[in-house]
Amino acid sequence: MKYKAKILIVDDEQIALRNLQHVMEKEGYEVVGTQQGPNALKLLDEQWFDVVLTDLKMEKVDGMQILKKCRDLYPDAEVIMITGYATIKSAIQAMKKGAYDYIAKPFKLDEVRKVVWEAIEKVRLKKENEELRSQLESFSGKVKIITQNPKMLALLDTARQLAPTDCNIIVTGESGTGKELLSRYIHYASKRAGGLFYAINCGAFTEELLSNELFGHEKGAFTGATEMKKGLIEMASGGTLFLDEITEMPTSMQVKLLRAIQEKEFLRVGGTLPVRVDVRFVAATNRNIKDSIKEGRFRQDLFFRLNVVSLHIPQLAERKEDIPLLAYYFIKKYSSLMKKTVGNISEDVTFILMNYDFPGNVRELENIIERGVALSNSSAIEVAHLPEDLRELTVRIFRKKEGRIPALEEQEESYIKWVLREVGGNKTLAAQILGIDRVSLWRKLKKYGLENVEA
């Protein structure tokens, strides 16, 4: 959504005040104006403003007093000084005390628009970062699944509803999307939360080793079995067993697992007495299970036992709005682990991440941020801290329009709209990506009627 900034304009010259109010209102800002310095202080006591545009020299209360009041009450707001030529030195002093910029009289309206826009963009970015941090703080519980994507939020809502039912579940999704994390989320939201959660990758073991891991063995069952060993199914009794990459399990093992699920009992390797268990099974795969069934690599009866409910996790490329949120979460995590003070991501890095397909999904994003935190010697992750293939990422779009090659002007308009959408409406970042200054972008937005384009 378009960010609607709130501006306070203070100028004891009525005509100047009226002109500035008119210009700022036309830009779509919410504007409050006053000719009186004391009244400006009162307004600051009563309400928040993103930007304060104030004359420096006024009677009773001047711009420096307004600056101090604003800095004390709203440190994230920005103050712009309006000054005559004779007081430019004072305006520079004001900037040293925290003013964002100054505008010298007589000023050009384009200059005012530019400076105000830049100040608002700075405030907006600070607010966005603060909102991201506050969202991260709001995630609680033993398992944190961080998302603001509607599909993911609906998926978590379904998972919470399923958790108390104790039914078996299959979780599908590409590698790195968080299938095990979702399974843990279900476990801790269920009545089994007091029990144990175990996970095993079914494709990481030979058939013999997998049988031993799942079912355990009796003493003397084979050479080297000097004592009885419990398997994961037995150890997970009262809790949850997560079977990752279930389609990689050998078919002979699938028969044994099916019996354990159906009968709630099994035999340890070398055993003769059945072991009773109470386990919830959550299986996961990055493959199409129905294709595996058709190919004879996965038993249909086991599929029906496990697939009481199926949950699909979308790939990260389908939920790009989660990328900044997850990135900040991982920054916080690895900064703490590495005892570093990295807390931000540069705008260039944000653009690259938002335009990358992430074939490795959330796991790949985590690795990128971990690397960035490790390499950064400042408070932010910069492009230089990214892997080489990401540093070289470029975006090119050339599309036909209604069967014809579009004119340059049409392509420019479409490209500007696309860039704005990709960066969430951040015009400062959009200008940087387009390789033009912010005033030039503002003129192009005016030209194409895109000033109010929403992200």
Image (cartoon, helix red, strand yellow):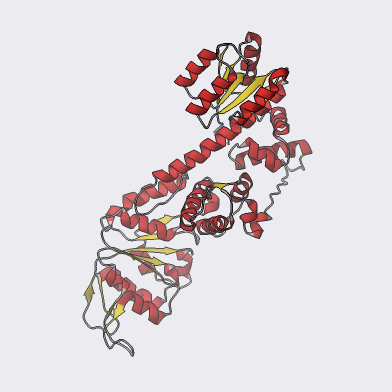
Q: Nearer the viewer, residue 186 or 386?
A: 386
Q: Residue at x 62, y 9 (%)?
A: 14
Q: How many marks?
A: 0
Question: Percent from the top left, x then y, of residue 139?
Answer: 39, 46
Q: Is residue 382 left or right of residue 150?
A: right
The residue most toward the top is 14
Q: Position of residue 328 (x, y in %)?
A: 50, 48
Q: Quadrant of the C terminus?
A: top right
Rendered residue at 44%/67% (across/down):
245
x and y, in percent, of residue 272 in the image: 23, 83
Q: Tell me if 71 is positioned left or right of 107 in this view.
A: left
In the depicted structure, whether residue 104 falls above or below residue 141: above
Query: Which quarter of the figure has residue 359?
Result: bottom right
**Residue for point 39% across, 80% down:** 209
Q: Is residue 368 above or below residue 135?
A: below
- Report the side of 413 relative to 183 (left or right): right
Q: In the picture, which quadrant includes the N terminus?
A: top right
Whether residue 407 is visible to the viewer of this picture, yes or no, is no
Q: Is residue 241 visible?
A: yes
